[in-house]
Image: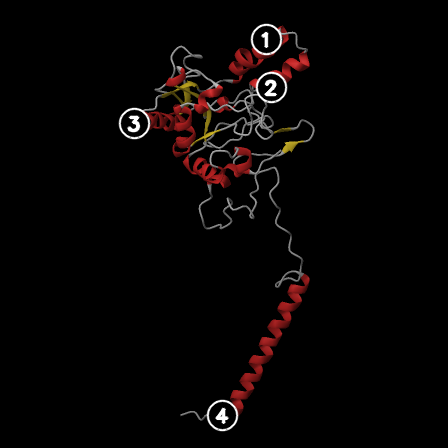
Amino acid sequence: MARYNPRKKNILGYAGLVVILSMALSAGIGIAFGNSETGKTPVPTPSNTANNTADPSDPNTNTDPNKEPTARDKALSGQDFTIDPATGMAKEIKVVDDNYMILVNRTHPLAQTYKPDDMVTVKYVVSGVGKKGETDQLRKVAAEAFEQMVEAAAEDGINIKMRTGFRSYEYQRDRLYDVEVKNNKGKGMSEEKAIAEADKATARPGHSEHQTGLALDVGGESEKYALSYSFGETKEGKWVAEHCHEYGFIIRYVDGTKKEPGKLTGYVFEPWHIRYLGVEAATEMYQQGGGKLTYEEYLGILD
């Protein structure tokens, strides 16, 4: 049986103390120079800019690499938001993919060639409006969500229908924007004034969410399914404002008025214009802003 040796214990104790002091000294040197392993100053993590890098200080951002990315994370990683100083525009979106959270507005355009390849005809459409086989369609995921919303509304005694869905670049240019400019000129406006007024009323080609196949104009029975600024005050408009997020939609241009475009969205308030983002994102936006939060604010893209 080994005999207890107090001197040996003391030697081990001294050795342990030396090791601890050495470790502490090493750590202190590392901290002083910025890194406990190399003594080199670490490269700072870039903060969120007008591109696809999420801001870790934002409560909406998921910074845990082991967790599934949030809807907002996916939106930020799915598009280049960088603005070209020379043009004032972000890069055109040309490729159709499964990104249902594409940002499209005055400065974030779609290419003329952009057209979804998964569109279907919506069941509940106002007849005789638009162009059959085009404006009566949405991307499949948005069409199914809207149809569910219409059926849920009907159970509450609310009757709504889609008036306009997908609009191609050419449709937006030839049948809406250019017509608006021409009409304004006919009222005696200069070219510059005619364009400025047209910009308030309708999107330029390539800048309309309708081209994504994820946005639509909805009308209610109270006003014979017409598009009206008073839609928001009808029972149908109120129901849509309260419940559309449950089906993945938001009312898009909430920062504008019926006369002046919003500073963030660039468009006048259209209580009938809703956009599909998916239930997760739409619900987060509704919870954060009660239906008054713009998509730009949600993403943190404020240019």
Q: Secondary structure at mark 3?
A: helix
Do we see residue 204 in this rendering?
A: no
Q: Which mark is residue 183?
A: 1
Q: Amino acid at mark 1?
A: Asn
Report the residue marked by disc 3. 155
Q: Position of residue 23 (x, y in %)?
A: 60, 72
Instruction: Please tell me whether residue 155 is drawn above or below residue 279 in the rendered image.
Output: above
Q: Which mark is residue 273?
A: none
- Tell me which numbered mark, 3 or 1, is placed earlier along the sequence: 3
Gap in angstroms between the C-alphas marked 4 and 2: 92 Å
Front of the two marks 4 and 2: 2
Q: Quadrant of the N terminus?
A: bottom left
Q: Mark 2 — residue?
A: 199
Q: How far across and how far down the image is residue 36, in percent? A: 62, 63
Check disc 2 and give the amino acid type: Asp
Q: Relative to 133, is 7 on the left or the right?
A: right
Tell me if residue 256 can be seen.
yes
Looking at the image, do the residues carrying marks 4 and 2 touch, with CB atoms under 8 Å apart? Answer: no
In the drawing, what numbered circle is on residue 5?
Answer: 4
Q: From mark 2 to mark 1, how far is it between C-alphas?
A: 13 Å
Amino acid at circle 4: Asn
Specify the quadrant that holds the C terminus: top right
Residue 3 % position (x, y): 44, 93
Q: Position of residue 88 (x, y in %)?
A: 66, 28
Q: Secondary structure at mark 1?
A: helix
